[in-house]
Amino acid sequence: MTCQRTVFPARDLRPHLKLLGRTRLLDAGLELSWSASGFALRVTASRLVLRFADYVGADACAPVCVRVSCDTHTQKFVLGGTSPCILFDDLGERPVTVTVLRVSEGDLPLYLTDLELWGVSPTIGLPPPPSARRMLFLGDSLTCGYGTDSRPGDTVFRTWEEDVTHAFAYLTAEALEADYQIVSVSGQGITRNCNGEHGVLFSEFWDRARRGDLSAADESGFVPQIIVVNGGTNDCNGKCPAEELILGFDALIDRLHAAFPRAHVVLAYGLCEETFVPVQRDLVERRRAAGDGRVLFCRQPSIHDGVLPDAAGCNWHPTTASQQRAAAVLIGFLRETVLPEIEP
């Protein structure tokens, strides 16, 4: 049998794609800017080739990692330079769902320009259906998955050791079968970043369509039912006073309520340090006492509690095992407190 090659430009793929995370289809191609942005599609083929625009910028030494998976196997690829591409083989010439995700962060967007299928009669089917659950995660390096795959005690960050699909946010969305957006930037705080500076804060980047571009507002129309905010760790490192943090949280929550009046906001904190646990818990109790019943606090399990032997990886960030533990706590919390409120 003759093997055929069919090429699909990114602009022609929209009817076939389920966009994942905060992903946009533009003239330049399918834009993967945020962690866990990407897409899923159904194909029948033996081989898949993904072609991307040049990935070069001010920091050409920092590549981007992309995870491709189908029904039978998963592989991670490190991309960079001019005209990078991915070859994904052994699809079996049967209908399979292929998922493509950006798993490492960075301000430089990655653009898929076209998709190439090989097989006896390669085809693309209808996209996977949307989920009934929708979640938005706002966070810092803990949400990005910084150092999830690193060695305990390591002090040198390597791009390929960051994997957002090993972090608590993605794991939670996956377990709850929820569509999601993960909007997170390492080092960012609610009011102060990790070095104490007032940089680009949660309240400024949570509704951006593209990471690194504050002028690009999100126009995806994504309406979450649950918003998880993992903030305060970098504020603590940045010597933020509690009073300032409270003002920052109140301002962010008010903005989220205005944008998504029916969504529940969950503050999830305590994974790497615990200084602001009482502050966040008290903030939630104060707002609930004032009639705001859509704000909750979930205490994350600390990497310092001695339960896991290799809890901390690169620069004292949680390893995959710690992230899985944090996800289990959040999943249980949401099932007990929030899901009964939003589902019949």
Image (spheres, grey):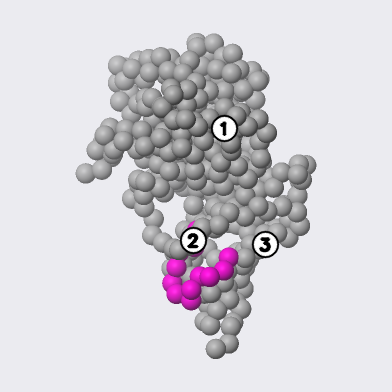
Using the image, tell me which numbered label, if any, was put on residue 27.
none
Q: In which quarter of the view is residue 290 placed?
A: top left
86 or 6: nearer the viewer: 86
- Secondary structure type for disc 2: loop
Q: Residue at x 50, y 10 (%)?
A: 243
Amino acid type, mark 2: His
Residue 162's place in the image compared with 98, above or below, is: above
Quadrant housing the N terminus: bottom right
Q: Quadrant of the C terminus?
A: top left
Mark earlier in primary sequence (2, 1): 2
Image depth: mark 2 or mark 1 in front: 1
x, y percent for residue 296: 35, 26
Determine crowd level at label 2: few under 14, some 14-19, many 20+ residues with C-alpha closer than 10 A. Answer: few
Residue at 53 percent of width and 82 percent of height: 120
Residue ID for mark 2: 73
Report, in whole angstroms, how far the alpha carbon at label 3 lies from the one at label 1.
32 Å
The magenta stretch spans which residues?
88-99
Residue contact at pointers 3 and 1, CB within 8 angstroms: no
